[in-house]
Image (tube, rainbow, N blue to C red):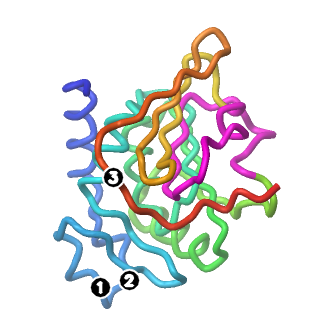
Amino acid sequence: MDPAAEARVRSAMSSISRADFLPPEVRHLAEGDRPVMIGWNATNSQPSTVARMLALLDVRPGDRVLDVGSGSGWTTAILSALADAEGTVIGVELVPQLVSYGRERLVETGAHAEIRAAVPDTLGLPDEAPFDRILVSAQATTIPVRLEAQLAEGGRLVVPVAGVMTVVDIRKGIPHRRADAGRYSFVPLEESD
């Protein structure tokens, strides 16, 4: 793990209040290192898991970033801090109530990012590819090759696959995949086509 990436993630996460992205009735749980239910069968992920995923993703200022499964918008906001004002961060979310909720949180916190409603039967935003970085906050059963195809040359995808955090790097047009240590649990990724 790159210590510089970890330091950038720590700084970005400390600048974005998790509580601001939680419903009022569960904001008292914001400081705990555990997932928090936010409604609509969704959770706000455990901070240590988010930190690990973001350090693996290694977002740089100016990157075009896609956040698949943006939920309450917390990771989308952190990604916007990492990509800086020169970057572009777009979250996509299937649950209409979470799209509205996440958008409201981004506006209230001043995050330089947007959340869009996911297009049914479409994974990611293929018409707006390529992206430098893609984060998936839902568990895939296999590597989502449709997201790999949306990566730019030198791009990176971080996705939990069957409980294993997986990193995909595109080099010379070829996906290079590796597994990270540890086991993770996420809501399922809607992968139908």
Is 148 placed left or right of 181 in the picture? right
Q: Earlier in the sequence, mark 3 or mark 1?
A: 1
Mark 2, residue position: 23
Mark 2 lies on a secondary structure that is loop
Question: What residue would you read off at disc 3?
Answer: 183
Pointer 2 or 3: first along the chain: 2
Question: Which region of the structure is painted magenta?
Answer: 123-150
Whole-angstrom CA distance, mark 2 to mark 1, is 6 Å
Q: Amino acid at mark 3?
A: Arg
**x then y, percent, for residue 59:** 42, 32
The number of numbered badges drawn on the structure is 3
Q: Secondary structure at mark 1?
A: helix
Residue 173 belongs to the span the image colors magenta = no
How far across and down, in percent of the image, does residue 55 sit?
31, 36
In the displayed structure image, the side of residue 129 where residue 131 appears, left or right: left
Q: Are marks 2 and 1 in contact (CB under 8 Å)?
A: yes
Residue 79 found in image quarter? top left
Within 10 angstroms of label 2, few (less than 14), some, or many (20 or more) residues?
Answer: some
Residue 130 location (% of width, % of height) = 69, 29
Residue indicated by mark 1: 26
- What amino acid type is highlighted by mark number 2? Pro
Q: Residue furthest top?
A: 172
Q: Quadrant of the C terminus?
A: bottom right
* Residue at point 41%, 55% (across, down): 75
Residue found at x 71% / y 60%: 118
